[in-house]
Amino acid sequence: MHFSTTQKRAFTWVGLALAAWLLLWALKPVLAPFVVAAVLAYALTPMVNWLDNLGRGRMPRVVAVVLVEVVFILLALGLVMLIVPILTKELPLMRDQVPQLFDRLNALLKPLAAQFGVTLAVDVDTLKALVLKYLNTNTEDLLSPVLSSLKLGGSVALALVGNAVLIPVALFYLLMDWDTFVLRLVELVPPRLREGYDSFMDDADAVLGQYLRGQLLVMLLLAIFYSAGLAAFGLDLALPIGIFTGLAVFVPYLGFGLGLVLATVSGLMQFASLKALIMVAVVFGLGQFVESFILTPRLVGERIGLHPLTVIFALLAFGQVLGFVGVLIALPASAVLLVAVRRVRSGYLASRLYTG
């Protein structure tokens, strides 16, 4: 069988793509910190370049890189310190509020059941004793399933420490030589394909830039909204839960769901009444409406144009392939793929295969 030059080229590119995919699949366990560092480098490089240009050659680029990375790390640590109170205060608060919660629920449910001719005979004291004993003696058992579910491989502590060290190191070198890395990748593109490649990358860069800038604004505004809304109802952990929920919307649905659960549990433990459910319904219902119909369409824009079903599929697909890191990069990667899909669609509609 004789293959034309075009067919041979096509088979070659398919083979190279398959080999690259198999290599990435084999290296998947060690790719996570480098993928995170590359995403951060893409987002932070414009700031480094701005500082570098501001210095006009009088300030070495390494100074700009160190300044940007240190500020980023301090911001990340600050966010962690805001979220830590959720973990440090939740269990003591639960221990303090469990007796009152059972008493109030018993006082509420007994008359309600009596209206329907049902008599509740619940030993509240025994239930309170069992729950308090479980909370006091099984804290480690409660955390162990979470740790084991991370599937980091080997020691969880060592993996976390290793990534905490490796990501900043990889980020430093990527920020220092980002333009060089990009140039070397471009040099691998055949000259006859360079024009199409440059056009595609310009479109993808525009989409990603719009997505990242818009998403950061959405996260900031939602963090302020959720913190203020929960604080208006008097929730003690309003600030950390609000900030966490606002920032976690970067991972669609999952971030909102985690914030909703944290606010519900904290509200029930603190108020032990229907006020907690009303608070969650009002604040998170209004927050979801504002995000879906006002902030995201206006700030992120319709240029990305990902359908909700596409978002859900992207989260599941990237999560299956790359784990938690895949969930983080699902939407930016899908935005780039969307540019490719649009170009393939345009080429197909203009081809003889479609027109006949």
Image: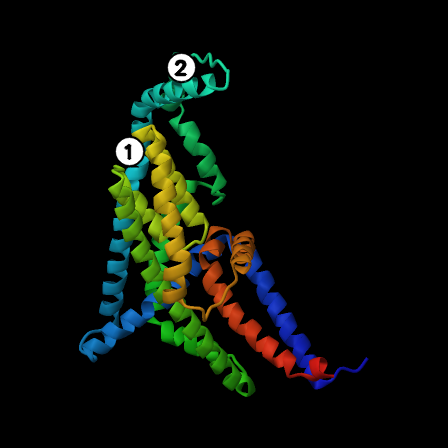
- Residue type at mark 1 is Lys
Give the quadrant of the C terminus.
bottom right
Task: For marks 2 and 1, give the CA distance.
Answer: 25 Å
Residue at 42% over, 74% down: 205
- Percent coordinates x, y for residue 133 in the rendering: 38, 18
- What residue does disc 2 label? 124
Q: Is mark 2 on a helix, strand or loop?
A: helix
Q: Which mark is residue 79?
A: none
Q: Is mark 1 on a helix, strand or loop?
A: helix
Query: Which residue is nearer to you in this view: 161 or 136?
Result: 136
Give the quadrant of the N terminus.
bottom right
- What residue does disc 1 label? 89
- Percent coordinates x, y for residue 121 in the rendering: 46, 12
Instruction: Tell me: residue 10, above or below residue 107.
Output: below
The answer to which image quadrant residue 64 occupies is bottom left
Characterize the local packing of mark 2: few (<14), some (14-19) or many (20 or more) Cα atoms within 10 angstroms: some
Marks 2 and 1, the one that precedes in the sequence: 1
Characterize the local packing of mark 1: few (<14), some (14-19) or many (20 or more) Cα atoms within 10 angstroms: few
Residue at 49% over, 59% down: 330
- Residue type at mark 2 is Val
